[in-house]
Image: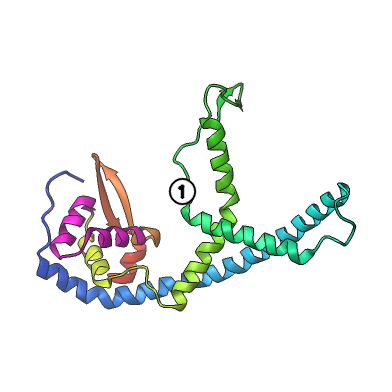
């Protein structure tokens, strides 16, 4: 790809093509949501099953530990109370999973002879280990939350794309690979906001309709074969 300036598609032509593609876009997005909901339903059953199985194992372990410490007798540890606390803690982790963002890099300590040891000169490795452990702890709650969100969106017909015309315009514009900055310029010429453009591009990457590659320091966006088959063939 060369670095020459890419001419912005005239508004009337791009909008006309976008309107022509809009029907296909809406139908394809609905199908994507249906497939995501089906996968999420299976994932939800699996996560609920894992939640109950792990809860049962944890209950037996806690009950055994309390009996060993003479804090309760066999069969006297209340199952209902345990599961109420267990559900409350899990719900808190589900909420926390929405806020948690993994770091790009973790410093786990000094390496020596193929082993990693605590670095006594900084607390960063201690904090990063706790941060990583929290990430592992939130895997199942986050999986549960995302499945619930996909099912909820499908039931309520909430499209993750707020404007199908914008989606169609972006896809029409990047039939030939386009620089990311030029996409924003072209869509702003059509009076779309920067936030809407960013949100739409993010979702199109998520469902594998577009990909991004860097060339000579510039990010180029191009269509995948998946969306070409849907829209142009």
Question: Which of the 4 image quadrants contains residue 84?
Answer: bottom right
Around disc 1, counting alpha carbons within 10 Å, would you say few (fewer than 14), some (14 to 19), or many (20 or more)? few
The residue at the point 52 percent across, 59 percent down is 95
Q: Secondary structure at mark 1?
A: loop
Q: Report x, y in % for residue 49.
A: 67, 65
Q: Report x, y in % for residue 176.
A: 21, 57
Q: Is residue 23 above or below residue 145?
A: below
Q: Report x, y in % for residue 180.
A: 23, 52
Question: Which of the 4 image quadrants contains residue 42?
Answer: bottom right
Query: Would you say the magenta stretch is mainly helix, strand or loop?
Result: helix
Horizontal relation, residue 226 to residue 154: left or right: left
Q: Report x, y in % for residue 61.
A: 79, 53
Is 188 a magenta residue?
yes
The quarter in which the C terminus is drawn is: bottom left
Horizontal relation, residue 161 to residue 47: left or right: left
Q: Is 127 or 212 nearer to us in this picture?
A: 127
For the question of whether residue 233 can be seen, the reply is no
Q: Is 189 or 173 nearer to us in this picture?
A: 189
Specify start and end residues of the magenta stretch as a single range: 178-203
Is 128 a magenta residue?
no
Q: Is residue 71 above or below residue 91?
A: above
The residue at the point 86 percent across, 55 percent down is 72
For the question of whether residue 19 can be seen, the reply is yes
Q: Is 3 or 116 nearer to us in this picture?
A: 116
Task: Give the total of numbered labels.
Answer: 1
Q: Please give the residue where the numbered disc 1 appears in the rendered image.
A: 101
Horizontal relation, residue 66 to residue 15: left or right: right
The residue at the point 48 percent across, 73 percent down is 152
């Amino acid at each position: 790809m060369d670095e020459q300036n890419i001419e912005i598609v005239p508004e009337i032509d791009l909008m006309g093509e976008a309107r022509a593609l809009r029907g296909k876009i809406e139908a394809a997005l609905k199908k994507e949501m249906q497939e995501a909901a089906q996968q999420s339903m299976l994932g939800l059953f699996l996560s609920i099953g894992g939640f109950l199985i792990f809860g049962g194992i944890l209950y037996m372990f806690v009950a055994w530990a309390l009996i060993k410490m003479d804090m309760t007798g066999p069969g006297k540890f209340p199952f209902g109370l345990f599961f109420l606390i267990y559900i409350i803690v899990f719900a808190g982790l589900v909420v926390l999973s929405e806020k948690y963002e993994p770091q790009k890099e973790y410093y786990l300590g000094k390496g020596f002879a193929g082993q990693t040891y605590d670095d006594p000169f900084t607390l960063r490795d201690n904090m990063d280990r706790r941060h990583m452990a929290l990430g592992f702890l939130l895997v199942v709650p986050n999986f549960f939350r995302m499945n619930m969100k996909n099912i909820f969106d499908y039931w309520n017909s909430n499209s993750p794309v707020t404007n199908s015309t914008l989606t169609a315009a972006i896809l029409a514009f990047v039939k030939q690979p386009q620089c990311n900055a030029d996409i924003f310029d072209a869509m702003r010429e059509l009076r779309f906001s920067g936030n809407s453009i960013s949100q739409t591009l993010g979702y199109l990457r998520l469902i594998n309709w577009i990909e991004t590659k860097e060339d000579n320091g510039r990010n180029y966006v191009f269509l995948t074969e998946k969306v070409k088959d849907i829209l142009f063939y």
